[in-house]
Amino acid sequence: MGLSAFYTSAYTTSEEDKIRVFHAAVDLGITLFNSATFYGELNEVGYGENLRLIKKCLFGIDRSKIKLMVKIGMDTRCPIEKTGSSWIMRGTPEELMADVDFALQSLGEDYLDIAILCRLPPNVPFEDVMRGLNALLDSGKVKEVGVSEFSAENIRKAKELCPITYIEQEWSLWTRDIEEEIVPTCRELGIKIVAYSPLGRGFLSGKLKLEELNNNDYRRYGQPRLAQDNIDENNKLLQALEEFASRKNITVGKPSLLRNIKLLFQCVCFLNITPHYKKSLLRTLKFCLAIIVTI
């Protein structure tokens, strides 16, 4: 996401360096790469931009060693002069299949490891959306499916109709609401959580400087917590985190990352998966923990 749009890094990093970052991540043992059909400039030209970048990144990579996760169900295509004006949620079986076909064509691949429904469309019956996700599995074009930004109630409903195995939700020290109902529900149902923005879109790193962001960086205008009316109060919370990190002689971002990894350990221990796969996940989490501790 940050390599193609929305963040300053997308506009200040060369394509060559973006590819180097991807390869460095693979070399470090990272196996899950999360994209979306709409990651790119929010117009008809930028639609699929991140997928086309990943296609270049995959050159020379052993595909069997990584997983590609792609969010579908959001159409941001519009004329360039109307960039950012179109956010159309899609969810019929035909639309979801079209999104997957677009992703595969853009990636130059013949399957996705995981397809994630970006949002639940309000104008499509729930059962039809789930039927569409099941059709993706039946087609062989997708190995696993999941959802994003679902309530605990909707996660249960979805699981009854479709074998969803992932949910993507924001989760950090800054955003803990999912711990009340969603995390326990996922533990019960054996659903893996992909936690996005574990550093609060950079804020919890202690290094975010709003005045240095590119004009196209959406944190300048799309984040209420970073708006002028709220930033002073949030800076007080950050200061407390900085003081804690200083006492422990660690970087400011580590408490947030370590906490998420601890909770993910707990989630893995409750997953209804094979012992071999569970051990594999735990090894991966321990590896990530070792990397964070040495940062």
Image: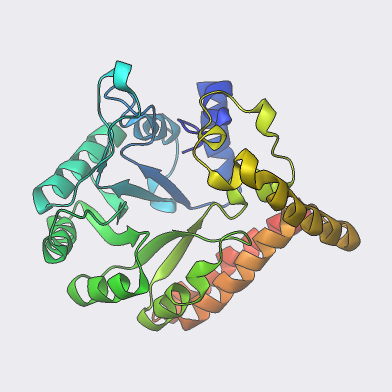
Taking the view exactly as shown, the residue that stands out farthest to the top is: 81
Q: Position of residue 49 (x, y in %)?
A: 36, 29
Give the residue at x 29% y 49%: 112
Q: Is residue 167 left or right of residue 213?
A: left
Q: Position of residue 248 (x, y in %)?
A: 87, 63
Compared to residue 161, the image places residue 242 above or below, namely above
Give the residue at x 36% y 73%: 152
Q: Position of residue 31 (x, y in %)?
A: 48, 53
Q: Position of residue 188 (x, y in %)?
A: 40, 83
The residue lying toward the viewer, choosing from 55 and 1, is 1
Can residue 34 be seen from the camera position used here? Answer: yes
Q: Is residue 103 left or right of residue 15?
A: left
Residue 100, by quadrant, is top left
Give the residue at x 67% y 60%: 256
Residue 163, by quadrant, is bottom left
Give the residue at x 17% y 56%: 136
Q: How is the image coloured?
A: rainbow
